[in-house]
Amino acid sequence: MSVTACQGLGFVVSLIGLAGIIAATCMDQWSTQDLYNNPVTAVFNYQGLWRSCVRESSGFTECRGYFTLLGLPAMLQAVRALMIVGIVLGAISTLVSIFALKCIRIGSMEDSAKAKMTLTSGIMFIISGICAIIGVSVFANMLVTNFWMSTANMYGSMGGMVQTVQTRYTFGSALFVGWIAGGLTLIGGVLMCIACRGLVPDQTNYKAVSYHASGHSVNYRPGGFKSSTGFGSTTKTKKIYDGGVHTEDEAQSHPSKYDYV
């Protein structure tokens, strides 16, 4: 799979997962009334993170919000916090990943910067998915505990005869939406992290050196070498002496030390 396809697939999967997390947080069916062995079927209760609702057999539904903060269970408040943190991290990572997409060119942004942004967004997507999965799992564990406690209180010691009728709650549809959405966000973040490796440019251990061929034709002679540019006879010929490179006029005006021997 190419880097662009892997990055794009991770972004789309994470975006779908984030939308699912938002939908699960806003849904009211986190816990629904267990109708098994319940003689009262005219009223159906279900609860969410923000309000509880009652639906009658006539189709009328009435919802009441939780108008208190300190009066709510600590586990419910923890689930709220986890879901909100997951949504915030997912929104931030979505904005970062948009600018990190390889198919989008913004100014003179290098591939190394896009690789770092892709890795950052992938890690944030992973944390967002983990927060959603943990929040849903904590709420599900709370439902299981309350369900069995309510079941134990319903039955007495008189041959298992039902003494009281209590409302028991079981898993709602929002829990399954949250689990699936958290998993999708987690998988999308992993794909973004994998795509980051392909965006990093290859680094070599040597530096390229450009070589330019000389434009002068060099003629080698026993007395040194002469370089002629081919622009006419007006160009003075250069010879190599012991003191360095000099023209013929300079050599005559400045004799070497061997001329006095």
Image (tube, rainbow, N blue to C red):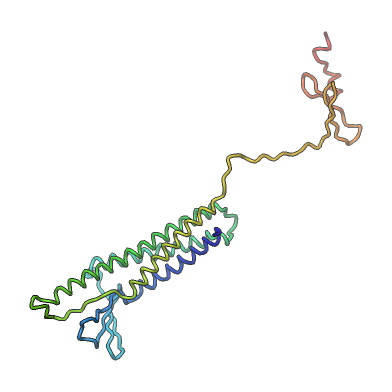
| Residue 120 drawn at (x, y percent) | 46, 56
Q: Which residue is more in the foreground, 252 or 90?
A: 90
Q: In this view, does 255 lie to the left or right of 205?
A: right
Name the residue: 54% across, 54% down. Answer: 199
Where, quadrant-wise, is the C terminus in this rendering? top right
Q: Examine the rendered structure and indicate whether residue 247 appears above or below residue 160.
A: above
Q: Residue 106 at what x, y percent from top left?
A: 58, 59
> Which of these two is toward me, 207 or 231?
207
Residue 73 position, x and y percent, is 23, 68
Residue 140: x percent and y percent? 28, 69
Instruction: Please state if 110 lies on the left or on the right of 236 as rendered.
Output: left
- In this rendering, position of residue 119 left or right of residue 82: right
| Towards the viewer: 43 or 61 | 43
Quarter of the image where the N terminus is located: bottom right
Compared to 252, does 120 lie above or below? below
Of all residues, the one furthest to the bottom in this rendering is: 58
Residue lying at 41% horizontally and 60% vertically, measured from the top left: 126
Q: In which quarter of the image is residue 105?
A: bottom right
Q: In this rendering, would 13 be left or right of 69?
A: right
Q: Which residue lies furthest to the front in this view?
A: 159
Question: Residue reaching furthest top?
Answer: 261
